[in-house]
Image (cartoon, rainbow, N blue to C red):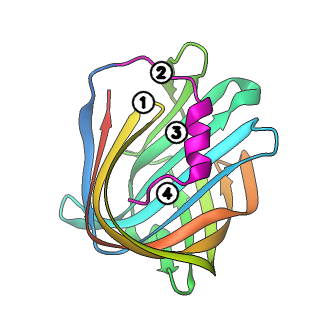
Amino acid sequence: MPRLSSIACAVLALAVVLPSVSARVVEQATSNDAGAVLSHCDADFNLCVFLSATRVVSGGQPATLLFYSIWDYQNGIYREGFGTLPRSALTGTPATGMTLSADTAVAGFVNETCDLVTGICTPSAGGIVQAQWTPTGFFSFRETFSSRFTIGNVTFRSSGVRSGVSALASATLLGLYSFEDVAGNLATNHNTSITIEKP
């Protein structure tokens, strides 16, 4: 699972902390394959987004693990979604670029909208999430990692080895939010484990 960039960390610093509740494991997966990340805030920090898509094995089956989070400060809401989708939802390679085309309005995929003041989250409809990453070669990396981070009321734990490159990304989320040429990265995972926890 790609880790948060400095932009996403800045987003977290602005987010309202949701109430603490005991969490349970809702997803476990492994990856020896590719993944892609984008993170972006607009100039006024009224709208911030983090999107991660990774090719994984979950429940013994190949799949794409997708997570999105959207801080819509102007409207006082936070949207999140996560779950596994068909492997075919994420195509390409880190070397040539990757494309995501997914419908999160399917059974088993969790979509929620949360009130940034009260922290109360309710199920939402989901929708189409599309993104494209183009490698730039501005930087490359290889890292051994063990990480835990919480966004909204979802906690990700991951460990393994990643190697990848910088990328420019464009995306449309849920038919409501669009971004072009924002910061991202493309990476290949090695012996990576991913666990998602949620109240």
From the viewer's perspective, is residue 89 above or below residue 25? Answer: below
The earlier-in-sequence mark between 4 and 3 is 4
Amino acid type indicated by mark 1: Asn
Task: Please identify the quarter of the rendering in which residue 197 is found.
Answer: top left
Q: Assess whether residue 13 is covered by the magenta stretch.
A: yes
Judge depth for marks 2 and 3 and give the one in front.
Answer: 2
Say which of 168 and 121 sits in front: 168
Residue at the left extreme, as displayed: 60
Amino acid type indicated by mark 2: Leu
Q: Position of residue 178 (x, y in %)?
A: 74, 53
* CB within 8 Å, label 1 to label 2: yes
Is residue 127 in view?
no
* CB within 8 Å, label 3 to label 1: yes
| Residue of label 2 | 18
Amino acid type indicated by mark 4: Ser
From the viewer's perspective, is residue 131 above or below residue 126? Answer: below
Task: Please identify the quarter of the rendering in which residue 51 is found.
Answer: bottom right
Q: Residue 52: which numbered mark, if any?
A: 4
Structural distance between the alpha carbons of marks 3 and 1: 9 Å
Residue at the right extreme, as displayed: 43
Structural distance between the alpha carbons of marks 2 and 4: 21 Å
Determine whether the residue tagged by mark 4 lies in a helix, strand or loop: strand
The earlier-in-sequence mark between 2 and 4 is 2
Say which of 175 and 25 sits in front: 25
